Image: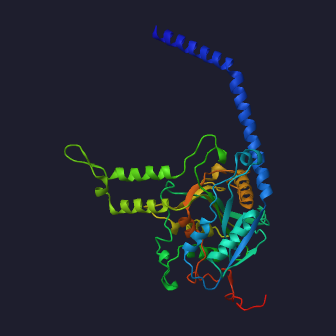
């Protein structure tokens, strides 16, 4: 009897549901179609907006003597922070978006280069602020090294092509230049610069080998209607508070009357250090970030050991107690039976190469391509991308032969 009652109830429920769906169909079908067309409209307008911005690739050449600490790079990165995309008309009619930038470390046959990619309209700001912090550098517009590379399995082999992710949630910082004592501006012989390992790896490439590291950044902020979101997305500080509460909860003890004891007194020194590190970085300017990297070479000189070198070169930025980098989405598969004919790997390599060339992750056509942006502050970004001093003895690092002499003050005008 219960079974019959249940079946009757189910039948009645389904009948009522179908009736309501049929009656309201004009509303939800219209809403679905409008939403679908709206997404297509925004996609097309954003593509058009990106094309109109233009872009430029700037190469930075360093002097032989560079005495600035990574803090100078942090000050420069602060000037790139622009969380505003424009008015509602610009966002929804013209497709305007927050600007983004690409910080790139590149080795071509062992010759190491520093590049910064930006929209054409930001060129003067980038150059002016770089010269303000590093007056002895040289900045040149460069032809895009990536455009001449095409996936040709007959000639070159892609050893690894992928994106990095964080090992822990965003609030946990990586090991930064402050942790390495570089904020105290020690003498060159006493510096322990984590970027040196990356530069040494890049400098070890031979003729016919290339290794690229691309760091895409965009100002992080609370996202609402003016940033193309109907449902507001809070900024990362909400997650920071949650993580700190989680750590504090680990120190909670109960006394014999089952009353809570002050948690901070029972935290280990390591836990206190983690909270301190999180709170320090929370006060810094934050950027949405995605890091891509690849190693490839002519078939006759390809060395699979360089895959481990590329991925491992990022390990010194990590800490077991804090955060670090790990491989995320890549063109490779862990087991051969996952892609027995190599078709999927080939397709991924083509997509990643095209996304790299376009510097596309925050905007179409590769928006959030197989990953989500993570948060890095200016302190963290300045750690993984800065101009090293003499401690970086990589012989193939492109440097200016001599210091630029200042013009005499009494030159006739």
Toward the left, the furthest residue is 256
Indicate the position of residue 289 as horizontal and vertical percent values. Answer: 61, 58
Left or right relative to 334: residue 265: left
Which residue is located at x 75 percent, y 57 percent? 354
Residue 87 appears in the figure:
yes
397 or 347: nearer the eye? Answer: 397
Which residue is located at x 40 percent, y 59 percent? 275
Res 72 quadrant in image? bottom right
Res 40 quadrant in image? top right
Indicate the position of residue 262 as horizontal and vertical percent values. Answer: 28, 52
Which residue is located at x 54 percent, y 77 percent? 69
**286 lies above or below 257:** below
27 or 355: nearer the eye? Answer: 27
Indicate the position of residue 93 as horizontal and vertical percent values. Answer: 76, 45
Where does the C terminus fall, quadrant-wise?
bottom right
Left or right relative to 156: residue 245: left
Residue 298 appears in the figure:
no
206 or 15: nearer the eye? Answer: 15
Indicate the position of residue 118 as horizontal and vertical percent values. Answer: 72, 64
Which residue is located at x 28 percent, y 57 percent? 265
327 or 62: nearer the eye? Answer: 62
Left or right relative to 271: residue 137: right
**24 lies above or below 404:** above
Res 349 quadrant in image? bottom right
């Amino acid at each position: 009897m219960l079974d019959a009652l249940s079946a009757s109830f189910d039948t009645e429920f389904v009948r009522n549901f179908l009736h309501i769906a049929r009656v309201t169909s004009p509303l939800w079908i219209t809403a679905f179609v409008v939403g679908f067309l709206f997404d297509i409209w925004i996609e097309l307008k954003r593509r058009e907006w990106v094309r109109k911005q233009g872009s430029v690739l700037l190469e930075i050449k360093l002097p032989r003597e560079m005495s600035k600490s990574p803090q100078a790079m942090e000050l420069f990165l602060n000037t790139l922070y622009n969380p505003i995309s424009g008015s509602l008309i610009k966002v929804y009619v013209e497709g305007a978006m927050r600007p983004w930038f690409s910080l790139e470390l590149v080795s071509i046959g062992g010759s190491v280069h520093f590049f910064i990619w930006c929209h054409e309209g930001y060129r003067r700001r980038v150059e002016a602020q770089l010269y303000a912090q590093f007056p002895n550098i040289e900045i040149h517009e460069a032809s895009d090294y990536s455009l001449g590379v095409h996936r040709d399995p007959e000639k070159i082999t892609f050893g690894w092509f992928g994106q990095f992710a964080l090992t822990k949630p965003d609030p946990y910082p990586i090991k930064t230049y402050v942790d390495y004592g570089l904020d105290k501006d020690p003498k060159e012989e006493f510096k322990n610069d984590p970027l040196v390992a990356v530069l040494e790896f890049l400098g070890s490439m031979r003729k016919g080998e290339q290794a690229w590291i691309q760091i895409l950044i965009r100002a992080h902020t609370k996202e609402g209607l003016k940033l193309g979101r109907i449902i507001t997305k809070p900024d990362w500080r909400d997650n920071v508070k949650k993580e700190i509460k989680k750590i504090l909860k680990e120190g909670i003890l109960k006394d014999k009357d089952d009353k809570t004891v002050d948690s901070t007194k029972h935290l280990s020194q390591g836990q206190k250090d983690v909270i301190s590190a999180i709170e320090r970085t929370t006060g810094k300017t934050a950027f949405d970030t995605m890091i891509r990297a690849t190693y490839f070479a002519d078939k006759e000189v390809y060395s699979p050991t360089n895959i481990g070198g590329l991925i491992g070169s990022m390990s010194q930025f990590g800490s077991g107690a804090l955060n670090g980098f790990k491989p995320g989405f890549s063109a490779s598969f862990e087991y051969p039976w996952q892609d027995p004919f190599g078709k999927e790997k080939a397709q991924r390599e083509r997509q990643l190469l095209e996304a790299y060339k376009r510097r596309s992750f925050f905007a179409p056509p590769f928006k959030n391509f197989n990953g989500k942006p993570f948060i890095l502050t200016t302190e963290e970004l300045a750690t993984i991308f800065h101009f090293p001093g003499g401690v970086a003895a990589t012989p193939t690092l492109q440097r200016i032969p001599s210091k630029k002499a200042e013009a005499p003050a009494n030159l006739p005008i």
